[in-house]
Every structure is written in structure tokens, then in C-alpha cells.
Image: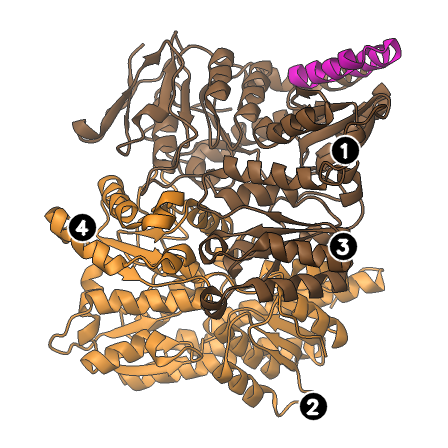
Chain colours: A brown, B orange
Amino acid sequence: MSDIRLDVIAGRERHICRKAGAISKAGSFSETGAVSDVVAVSEARAPGITCDTDSVAGAVSQRACVFCGARVVINPIADALHLIHGPIGCSAYTWDIRGSLSSGPELHRLSFSTDLREYDVIFGGEKKLYAALTELIAKHSPKGAFVYSTCIVGIIGDDLKAVCSKVAEETGIPVIPVQSEGFRGNKNAGYKAACEALFRLIGDGGQAGRIKAPVPLSINILGDFNLAGELWIIRDYLDRMGISVVANISGDSRVEQVAMAHTAALNVVQCSGSMTHLAKMMKAHYGIPYIRVSYLGLEDMSGSLREIAAFFNDPKVIQQTERLIEEETAAVEPELEFYLERLKGKKAAVYVGGAFKAVSLIKSFRALGMQVAVVGSQTGKQKDYEEIRCESDGGTVIIDDANPLELAQLMESLGVDIFVGGVKERPVAYKLGVAFCDHNHERKKPLEGYTGMLNFAREVYSSIASPVWDWVPRPRLAEGSLNHG
Amino acid sequence: MAKSFVSTTNPCRLCRPLGACLAFRGVEDSMVLLHGSQGCSTYMRRYISSHFREPVDIASSALSENQAVYGGAANLKQGIRNVVAKYSPAVLGVATTCLAETIGDDVRMAISELMEEEPALREITIVPVSTPSYNGGHMDGFNDACVAILENCAESGDQRGEINLFPGFVSPADLRYLKEVMASFGVAPMVLPDISDTLDGVIDGSLNRIPTGGARLADIRLAGSSAASIEFGQTFPESQSPALFLEKRFGVRAERLPLPIGIRYSDLFFESLERLTGRATSEIHRNERGRLVDAMVDAHKYLFGKRAVIYGDADFVIAMTSFLVDLGIQPVVCASGGGGADYLADLEALTSPLEETPALLARTDFDDIREHSREAAANLLIGSSKGNHIARELGIPLVRIGYPIHDRFGGQRILHAGYRGALNLLDLLTNTIIAREEAELGHGYSYM
């Protein structure tokens, strides 16, 4: 296997590695850039990618910030007031950003800001925060409020906790500060801040103590945000299995529901990057065990349902679970077969926010007869990358905190047919004549569950098989990857 | 009247550095670096890219906790080095964010130190611009960046007959049209910023690190020796006016006009070109005007008395209001997340002859717009896609124009400017109204 040579920014070399072993139909690798700038991405026999560090200055990282991490995790709680204490941009760019659906109230789809101005930066924003919280709670009667701090609040030193306590006392609803100053790390730090804020809501902030008799056959769903109604699909499965759900955190959830989360028997964690911290805190404090699951792809979906059933070890639940898996699989398999025949042998690149999703995507593509040639994440940690490495085929390039230049070079040199990512990566793929599948906030069709896998296959096929690519010159792509259809 | 709130609900303006990023994007062979935390650049890239559907690379100095406490100059310098190494731009815009401004980093000093340390960087034109997000909005940043580019690049010289065009924030389609109009007067203007290609590019199977197009640096240098500047937009102060900057420093005559949207303001643009060039408007454009008036007559009964809400950037709202007034549509709410005294005065002058005085809102948010729209029994919304929730709630149609359009396709190709743009808007407005009335009647039209 020859090395791929990439032109990367100094300091990025160790964020990219390649799994040893042959990659089938390896592309020809371009060599570009000055020698000193070029990093050879070679076989990594031992795990050891550099990750979970600050982004390199001057790199066009695809990552957002601490605030963003916290905001997207908590925001789907639909009957809470989500107030951003900061300047206008933080609020403008995250307004209804995730498209999390609610079956009831939709307060979370409004974007509230203290809209800090120069005066507030100089003289402090506490008074404005107090006034904003008070007037908004009076206007909207939320069941609780979260106050997110942003970069400048961390610098000017407003005492969020004090203001929140005061308003909580006056209004009688929980008012919880979220310590999410943008510069305090990367998105992972935001997830942690979110988990800590959520924990303060659960069981009256720990006052409740351990529950002697949890709700029978009950779980909390952690780390599903109900994009395109995905949570409802999962809840339907659980219902048919005979499992009840105490709280969804945070898709389609309510303040009261989250507050009761300590009464569940098990925490089921998807999107482990964002929610494992909360599961660990709940385990330590309330003794609730947790398992990690994924609802993406048939293999992981069925495996996850079986694991939930196995935890309760209830014969009826197990029987109902097996029946559900059989029915749902049978319902989608014929159409999936159609796509498998047409997609097998194609190559994909995957670049997503969380590493756990990447692992499921490798399996999903494999189920379609496809191979993932590049896989990366914004916020993966060492053990996540090890998991990715285990799941990947030999020759796969693994990349942490990538930027558009690196992604473009990888797409070109490996000759991928489709790129899976978020809306920032979409035009990069398209300009290269590479198909695209949106697996981020903007998706409008559910990708979780059995129907989700079908939607995924349809989307992959509808982009790869489109005749438009015949009109795009693709001069720099590796040979052998020109025919999509 | 809606109650006035301390807080903002659903912002109707974007932050200052985003405007700077858009303006730098209109300079050939340029990159922009935001001095701040990583999230700012990622948010803005997404926000811009979702509208234009183009790759939008914005670098960040990626400040973290240490720099927030001890200063971010080292990160800024490293960031500049890295951007230059990988993108090799001719022009590098460095815009600040609220974080950099609040910790008090001296960007100019850091850049001049860097030039000392790395003489090779002197080949690059680095343009710093101060854009704290807690002061003003995206149009401030947009204008600040334009003035900063001229301050750093424009030179004096023997006067030539050229004309500069400072179009403000208009669509790539508008820019292409404006250049076509000026070409019909024999003018090839220096357009700053020119995002017509950089934010609406072609596809050739490769990724240019910096997209093709934009105002050429050589032409920007010559802007100081042009005969005149035409500038659209009249609501921003002198210090933010590229045309007035050139007039003051180099004596280039400034013609400040409203955005040429709708018939009366397009007339002002054509009259200005006739004056500056001494040439008459060509038959092509005279005929386009003729067809516009013809269509206004054909459409008038569908439009008269309709109650419209218009929102967006201050100058855009003024220009659209003028067109609505000329069409017989009653503006009931005119609203901007920006705008000051001049904006309100212009709107008052435009709407004072009307039977009904609209609500004129400056520095407002979408919640206020929603309240006023409901109170005014509006039946048409006109503006960016960010009013879509109001349209849903009030059950009235939204005509998507301006920026951003995140929930529909082709926002970058909407033509608003000139007679041709007015005709396009007229068709859009009229058909939206017809479709809604047809849906309300419920039995379908065969003829109109």
C-alpha cells in the first residue's frame, strides 16, 4: 500500500492516520505541495491519533464551540426557556438550528438573547440578564429556564449562578446556568457543561437521592434529539417491546419529564460523546446503570434493542423484541436489496460530529456493500478512534478535527463516490463532483431505526445514481471512480 | 402597540464580523481570519454557505482559555502564518470578534510585529478591521470592511474616467445585472465587494482553495483615481461610507443613491449613470422599463390594497417600501434589525402620503415584527426566510427575497435590482397573491 501524501497545516500531522492492511481498489495517490508541507499518511499499527485538543489556529476547522455543544444538547427541551446571555450572533446562528421536533410546546424553537451591547460589556450584564429572564418568564410561563453563558460573559465575569438563583426563587421554576463560554475548550466541553446543567434538573438537583423501586421495565433515552421525528420511531419500538420511557433527553422532552429521570431503571445512551457524562453522573448519584446504543443501521438498531431487552431479562420483552426485529427487518430488506445491488463496491467518506455515529455509518455502508475509505469526527476521543479503527477496513484513513482542504484532498486521492457529513461539507463534495448525504441537523427524513436505514439507502442511492454527475468534469479524481451509476 | 422588551427574541440582525466576512469574500484572491474562538467562524460559514450553497472557508485564530486570559496575539500570528501557508491569499482580512475585543487584543500591533518577524508576509495585504459583535450588526461589519479595504489599498493617482460601484450587500444576480447595465453606458466599474462569482461559482470538478472572482486588488488600488463613485445605501454614517471615504481622501466624486430596487430608485440609478457618462440609457434598458410599467398596469388589481410586512437590512427595507408604495400595496410594517434615525426618516417620507401609516421599526426583532404583523392584519410577508415561522403562525404567504434564504433554493440568484429586478419581484409578488387567493377560493382557476 502506497502512502497518501497530504498537504496539511503544521501541527495537524498526527491528527490523521491510516489503518494498516490493504484497501480494495486503492486509488492512485497524488503528491502535492512543497515537500516540507507534505505529510505522509502511513499505516498505523498501534492506535495513537492525536485528538480532543484545541483546533490549530488558522485551520478552517469544522468544529463549533463550547456554547454550541451545550446549546444543541439542551435546547430540544421544548417547554423550557433557553436564554443566551451574550451578544446577538450566538443567538442568531443557533436559532432553531437543530430542527428538533416537539409533539407539544415549541418554546425551544424561539431564540432568546440578552443581546449584550458595549455598555453591558463595560458595566456588566447582570442587571440586563435579570430583567430579560424576568420579562421572558412572565411572558412565556416556561416550566424551567436555562441560561447559557457565552465568551464575553466569561470575560466580564457576570455571576450567572447568583442571578439564576434569585430568579428561581422569585418565579418558582428551576433556572439553571449553563457554563458554556465559547473559548473554554471544544464542543466536548460544551457537552459536559450541558450534562452538568441537566443533572441539576434531575431529581431536584440530586436532592431526591436513590430510588428504591424504579419504574418497572423503564428507561431514559439519552442522546436522541428527535431530528425529523426519529425519537418517535424509537419510542414506538420500545412501546412494542413493552418498555416504558421515563425521559427523553433531550428530544421532544419536557422539564418535568427530565426532572423525573432518576426514577428510571436504565439509561440508554446514544450520541455517547454528548451524554455519557450525564449517564455516569446518574450512575454515581442514583445508581442507574447505563448502556451505549446506536439506532443507525440494521445491525446496530437490532443489537441495541436486544441489549435493552437483555438488561431486563424479561421473557415477554425478549419475545416481543425478537418479533419486532423480525417484522421490521423483513419490511425493509427487499428494498434494501435493490440498493445493495446498485451500490456495492462504491466508496464513501464519512466526516461527522461524534465518533460513535461514524462507527454506525461504517456498518451501515457495509450493509449496502460499500466501503468507507475515510472516516473522521470533530470531537472523537482516543478510545472512540480505537473503536473506529477496529471497525474499519484496512487502508481506511482516520482523521480528527479535519478542515475542508484536508477533506478535499482525501476525497480526491481516494476517489470516493459519496461524502457523508453536514451542510458545511456539502458544497466541498459537490464542487469535486462527489455525491453527498446529509447526516446532520438539517436532515428532514429520519435516518434512525429500520425505516431510517431505508431512508439512508435511498438518499445515498439518489445522490450516487443521479445523472447530474455525468455533466461534471472530474479531472483530478482517481481513476476507476468515474462511473457512479 | 407591542410591548418593548429588554431581551431579544428571534434576532433580525446578524453579527458584525459576518458582514466583514461577506465583504472580504468580494475581493479577488482573498481570505479572512476571525480573531476569536473557533465557534464564530464555523457558525458564520454555515450561515453563509446555507444561502449561497458554495464552500465558505473562514479561518479562526481559535482562541482558548489560556489566550482569553493572557492575550491572543500569539494565536493570531500563528493563525495568519498558517492561513498564508495553505491559502496563499493576496489579501487577508483580519476581523475581530467580541472575545478579541473584550480581552483587548491589539490586532494592529500583532500584525506589525508579525511583519517584522516574517518579512515574506509583507507581500500580502493584510487588512485588519474591528468588528465587535456587541456593537452594531452585520451591515456595520460589511461597510467597515469595505472602508478598511480602501484605507489599506486605494492610492492616489492621475484622475481617470473610471467609475467605482459600491453596491452594498446585494445578490450575485444583482451584481451581474448592475455590471451589465453599466457596461451599456460604456462603464466597466470597480465593484467592491464583488461576490458575483465568489459566492455563486461554477463547478469544474476541483476545489479552488480561494474561489475565482472578486474585485481585483489592482483595480481597488486605482479606486482613488476614479472620476466618481456610485454607492447604494444611505442609512449608514459617513465613517462607514466607502464613497465618502474616497471623496474625502482622494477627491473622487461620491454619488450616494438608494438601493436601486423598484421603479423610482432604479430611475435614480439610470439618471445618475446618464449624468456621469453623458450617455443616454440604451434601448434595451428603456424597453425593460417600459415592460415593467406595462406589467405594473397589468398586475395592479391583484396588488392594490394588499397589506404587506417588509423586513430586512435598513436600505433594503427602504427600497422595497418605495416599490410597494408605487405598486399600490399598503406597507403595514416596515422593520429592520438595524436602522437608525435616517432610516426612519426615509421611511416616513415614503409612506406619509399613504392613507394608512405603517409601523416603522428600527433595531427590532422578529417577535416584535410578529406582534405588529398580527395587529396590522397583514396578509403578505416580504423578506428573508427567517420570517417563515410568522408566516406559518399567521397563515399568510411569505415572499422570500433578500438574505438569508435558508429554507428554499436559489437565493443567490434572486434578481432584485433595476427594472429587470423590479419585474422579477412584481411577478413573484403577484403570483404569490394569486396563488393564495386561488387556494382560499378552493376551486382552482382556469384563466386569470
Q: Which residues are magenta?
A: A298-325
**What is the C-alpha distance between the residues marked 2 and 3?**
41 Å
**B221, above or below A29, in the image:** below
Instruction: Look at mark 4 in the image and give the residue it sits on.
Output: B114
Q: Nearer the viewer, mark 1 or mark 4?
A: 1
Q: Chain of mark 3?
A: A
**What is the C-alpha distance between the residues marked 3 and 1?**
19 Å
Q: Nearer the viewer, mark 2 or mark 3?
A: 3
Q: On the picture, is B313 further left or further right than B366?
A: left
Label 1 sits on what residue type? Ala
Write the residue at 28% across / 69% down: B189
Instruction: Look at mark 1 in the image and give the residue it sits on.
Output: A261
Question: Where does the image place residue A425, in percent across and percent down from the top left?
Answer: 46, 38
Instruction: Determine whether the residue tagged by mark 4 lies in a helix, strand or loop.
Output: helix
Write the residue at 34% across / 35% down: A405
Label 1, residues with CA under 10 Å away: few <14, some 14-19, many ≥20: many
Asked if residue A309 lies in the magenta stretch, the reply is: yes
Label 4 sits on what residue type? Leu
Instruction: Determine whether the residue tagged by mark 1 lies in a helix, strand or loop.
Output: helix
Write the residue at 62% across / 55% down: A162
Label 4 with label 3: CB-CB less than 8 Å = no
